Amino acid sequence: MSSAPDTPVAEARADILARIAAAAKAVGRDPASVTLTAVSKKQPDDRVEAALDAGQRVFGENRVQEAEARWGERRDRVPDLELRLVGPLQTNKAEAAVALFDVIETLDRDKLAKALVKASKKTGRTPRLYVQVNTGEEPQKAGVAPGDVVDFVDRMRDEHGLAIEGLMCIPPADEPAAPHFALLAKRAAECGLDKLSMGMSGDYETAVRLGATSVRVGSALFGERPG
Ligand SMILES: *Cc1c(COP(=O)(O)O)cnc(C)c1O
């Protein structure tokens, strides 16, 4: 047992939704235009069940296999569930990802686009797609370079026949996030896209003020990830 009890998930969720609504209203946005994605990676099942009980329906996972284990059976129980892949996707897992996820937020290369097209033909499923942008141009991080985004999004449509719903970013951990959120919003506007997946536990209110249409919140909702 941990020394301090975790904030019950339902309470944390109500607080986060209120903060999202306040941040949206502060900049004249409709709170309903922001989706809370509950990032459940590595979280114990009882916390995920508590989130479902509280009415949470949009969940994010960063690994295909872990997500299959967790959601394979739950999916049938929760018909209005929406699953979003927020972690890097290898081409050899594209088919499994397309079969399970409703949204894939980490499209960042042509090879993966081809694998997704093939997987969609095979499974008959077409998840909504976000392009991940490496706003900090960090060498170790996935994502399209900010300067290449417009071309990349055009190519997804023109060469691969893929409709892109929006852009996603994970700012560098050691920098203020706001400039990265602003850059993502700028690139999206240049692409004619109006969906932005940005903001995590520490900065989702900032992200909402800068235009996020979905925020990906893990630890602030569920408590710290064990181990
Ligand atoms: C883990 C993760 C999150 C959630 O992080 P928290 O800081 O726990 O809110 C959001 N987005 C991505 C891509 C992640 O991998």
Image (cartoon, rainbow, N blue to C red):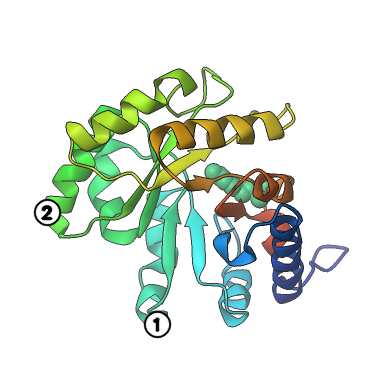
**Relative to 172, residue 167 above or below:** below
Q: Which residue is mark 2?
A: 122
Relative side of 108 to 94, left or right: right
For residue 67, say whether it is visible: yes
* Image coordinates for residue 127, horizontal then vertical, percent: 30, 55
Q: Earlier in the sequence, mark 1 or mark 2?
A: 1
Relative side of 6 to 3, left or right: left
Q: The N terminus appears in which quarter of the rendering?
A: bottom right
Camera-side residue: 98 or 147? 147
Mark 2 secondary-structure assignment: helix
Identified at 56% across, 20% down, the residue is 138
Disc sitting over residue 77 in the figure: 1
* Image coordinates for residue 167, horizontal then vertical, percent: 46, 40
Identified at 40% across, 20% down, the residue is 148
Identified at 70% across, 34% down, the residue is 178
* Image coordinates for residue 171, horizontal then vertical, percent: 62, 32
